[in-house]
Every structure is written in C-alpha cells, then in structure tokens.
Amino acid sequence: MEVEVYKSRRRPDTYLLVQAEEGLSRVPEELTIHFGEAELSFRFTLTEERRLARIDPVELRSRLVQTGYWLQIPPPQELNG
C-alpha cells in the first residue's frame, strides 16, 4: 500500500497519513478545518516490516482501510512540577 503523509501548516508536528490512491478524500471535513492547509510531506510503501515511529504498520494499514486516514499528533509534554 502506498501512503502519503501530509503535514499541517497550522499545527506543528501534526500529520495525516492516507492511502495515496484516495488522497484526502475520506478525511472528515471537520478534521480538515482543524488540521488547516495540508502540505504533502512525503510518500512511502507500507509493509509489515516497515518501522514507524508512533504506530504499528499492521495497525496503520487497518486504520487506513477502515477510516481512510490516520492522524498523528505530537505526544503530550510532561509538566515539570
């Protein structure tokens, strides 16, 4: 499966991953409004062996097939007490 990664111009370190053949067509309108302008960052071939930073490749494939997208947001920052 070919995957496109779009970065948000509005929200730092926030990305939308979608199936390349579908592009952003299945991303809900409300999400696109909050995400802001989507800029294509890169494209890659998703395989079970591929290492990804925040999601298992099998889980990513499942989510892309089911919902059409995966929203990757930065992890919450810990508060220093």
Image (tube, grey):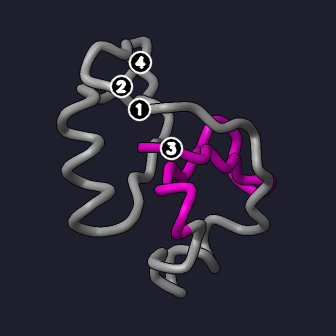
Amino acid type of the residue that numbered disc 4 sits on in the rendered structure: Ala
Q: Say what secondary structure mark 2 lies in.
A: loop
Measuring from the top left, give residue 14's x and y in whole percent: 59, 44
**Residue plotted at (70% across, 47% down):** 7
Q: Which residue is outermost to the bottom? A: 29
Mark 3 to mark 1: distance in Å? 6 Å
Query: Pointer 3: what residue?
Result: 2
Query: Pointer 4: what residue?
Result: 53
Query: Pointer 1: what residue?
Result: 46
- Asked if labels 1 and 3 touch by Cβ distance under 8 angstroms, the answer is yes
Q: In this view, does 28 lie above or below 19?
A: below
Mark 4 to mark 3: distance in Å? 17 Å
Task: Name the quarter where the N terminus is drawn.
Answer: top left
Q: How many residues crowd around disc 1 within 10 Å: few (fewer than 14), some, or many (20 or more)?
A: some
Q: How many residues crowd around disc 4 within 10 Å: few (fewer than 14), some, or many (20 or more)?
A: few
Q: Say what secondary structure mark 4 lies in.
A: loop
Task: Give the extent of the magenta segment.
Answer: 1-22
- In this view, the residue in front, 24 or 30, is 24
Does 17 lie within the magenta span?
yes
- What label sits on residue 54 in the rendered view? 2
Mark 4 to mark 1: distance in Å? 13 Å
> Of circles 2 and 3, which is in front?
3
Amino acid type of the residue that numbered disc 2 sits on in the rendered structure: Arg
Amino acid type of the residue that numbered disc 1 sits on in the rendered structure: Leu
